[in-house]
Amino acid sequence: MQKQIQFLLLNMAHFLDHLFMLVFATLAALALSAEWGLDYALLIPYATPGFIAFGAFALPAGWLADHWNRHAMIVVFFVGIGLSAILSGFASTPLQMGIGLFFTGAFAAIYHPVGIALVLEGHNRNGLRIAINGVWGNMGVAFAALLTAWFIDNAGWRAAFIWPGIVSILLGVIYLITATRLGQIGHDYKSGSQSKDANPVQSTVSAKAQKNFAKVLGIIFLSTALGGLLFQSTTFALPKVLAERTTQLTSNPMLVGQLAFLAFVVGSLGQLAVGYLIDRTSPRKIFMTVAAMQVVFFTLAITAHGTLAVAAAVGYMVAVFGQIPINDILVGRIARPEIRSRILGIRYTITILVMASTIPLIAAIHLNYGFSALFKVLAIAAALIFLVVSALPLNLQHRNAS
């Protein structure tokens, strides 16, 4: 029972991780621009330090987790990100907000290399397990728009940081109690088959297998970089995209938040489908299908307005979210358990540093050309992902998960 509670807490951590990183995106679009008298394009770059920290601290977090204790790191995540969110809620200037978001990003960086490794730990056929965990992360993205819009209307924008921050700290206490009872936090505990002497280069024994490992790892990292551009552009900008493209449908912030929530929730179904299918067929086929869907829906979104804009948003969110578990599952298949946090740390460092650089890109493109140009860039990036993943081996064997 406590194992199930722990898996639930790991899922809730993923939810909070993405929620905290995107609260500001909705606030900038719907509240802070008017309150602080700054144009949207000039305000959103203050989120950049947070996303830089989100990427820069991922690899150190993965290394520390592999050498110390993954479960203790999750406790640090819950408490640290909660306190940082509360700090952001007391910001009175854009600079203060940027500082709060930096600390939020630093603690948010812990989750992916550590939490994903814990989700993978002890399981061979982990596609659906990773997908379920990914859906919780997606729900964090979705509820960031919905809850923030609700707080704006009912309690003020500061509450969108402060109340989730308090909840996160309380969950950290519960995780500490649960992990302690399971004997997972203590002087002699090591997650899975962690070993300080493990050599991350020697992940296989044959020269052919080592070459295949390097090839797949290269594909993971390159598709990760391009995927980071797609994920950040869609999740961060979607509230503003819908606010601009659905003016004939609504001008109400709450309804815009609900439309974004709809796109994110339906998009999460794509992730579940991918998680189910990837345990039963070739990851290459699934990955190429998802990339092709991205090309189609980003192209449609270039000129879409009104109901068509909402439909296009649902389509590209299905495809963007559907890509997320594939790279994590590939890491689980090619890497030994004791080095997964480090490899996941590298992967998410790439993802999030790309995401950080994407914010100024969104601002510049929106200011000078509008969102039509942004969707053209995203369609090209999706086409490049399709070409890159076509080089994946047809089948990848499961590695020992324990």
Image (cartoon, grey):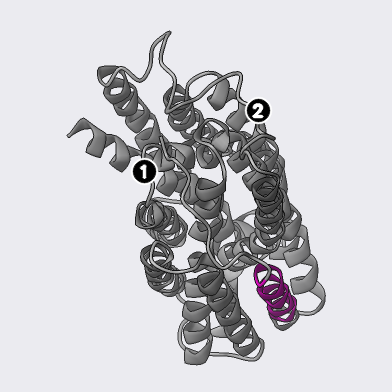
Q: Is residue 86 visible?
A: yes
Crowd around label 2: few <14 · some 14–19 · many ≥20 (10 Å): few
Find the magenta span and give its range.
374-390
Residue under label 1, please give it.
123
116 sits left or right of 178 in the view: right
The reply, left or right, for residue 40 in relation to residue 125 is right
Which residue is the site of mark 2?
Answer: 199
Q: Quadrant of residue 255?
A: bottom left
In this rendering, is residue 64 above or below 243? Answer: above
Indicate the quadrant containing the C terminus: top left, top right, bottom left or bottom right: top left
Q: Residue 184 in the image: x percent, y percent?
A: 35, 20
User: Gap in Å between the C-alphas at discs 1 and 2?
Assistant: 22 Å
Secondary element at image label 2: loop
Residue located 29% across and 35% down the image: 6
| Residue found at x 54% / y 26% | 65
Q: Position of residue 216 (x, y in %)?
A: 65, 55
Q: Position of residue 19 (x, y in %)?
A: 47, 50
Residue 197 relative to residue 122: left or right: right
**For residue 193, side relative to residue 46 (left or right):** left
Foreground of the two, 256 or 333: 333
